[in-house]
Image (cartoon, grey):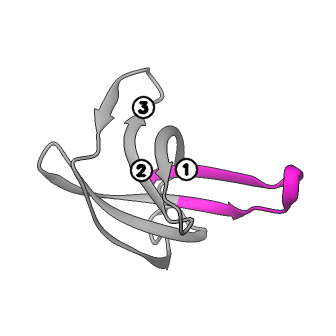
């Protein structure tokens, strides 16, 4: 059984080369969590919730989590969204 995509708000920075670094995540109920460290970034599927995107392996409160950035920027009409894998 697959889980679900849980779309979240993310505060991120962009460096001069265009690399994205997520800094803080806001859960659906409004709680916020600082992202202590980005451990890895690579294209990868979400095996629990389906879909494809950039998978950020991050450390939040000492625990490793996957945070996904999906979508394609297509000019002003592009849409990028962050999600985490919800429980099944």
- Which numbered disc, 1 or 3, marks the residue that appears first in the sequence? 3
Image quarter for residue 66? bottom left
Q: Residue at x 11, y 49 (%)?
A: 62
Q: Which residues are magenta?
A: 69-85
Res. 21 image quadrant: bottom left
First in sequence, mark 1 or 2: give its number. Answer: 2
Taking the view exactly as shown, the residue that stands out farthest to the top is 30
Which of label 3 and label 2 is nearer to you? 2
Residue at which label 2 appears? 22
Q: For the stretch drawn in magenta, what is the main secondary structure?
A: strand
Q: Which residue is mark 3?
A: 27
Residue 82 magenta-highlighted: yes
Marks 3 and 2 sit apart, C-alpha to C-alpha, by: 14 Å
For disc 1, the marked residue is 82
Please say if the residues under marks 1 and 3 sit with CB atoms less than 8 Å apart.
no
The x, y position of residue 34, in whole percent, is 28, 37
> Visible in this render: residue 19?
yes
Using the numbered discs, state the Cα–Cα distance from disc 1 to disc 3 in whole angstroms: 11 Å
Q: Cβ–Cβ below 8 Å for labels 1 and 2?
A: yes
x 76%, y 61%: residue: 73
């Amino acid at each position: 059984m697959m889980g679900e995509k849980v779309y979240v708000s993310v505060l991120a920075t962009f460096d001069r080369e265009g690399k994205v670094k997520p800094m803080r995540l806001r859960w659906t109920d409004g709680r916020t969590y600082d992202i202590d460290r980005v451990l890895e970034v690579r294209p990868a599927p979400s095996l629990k919730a389906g879909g494809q995107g950039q998978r950020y392996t991050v450390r939040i409160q000492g625990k490793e989590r996957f945070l996904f950035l999906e979508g394609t920027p297509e000019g002003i009409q592009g849409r990028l969204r962050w999600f985490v894998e919800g429980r099944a």
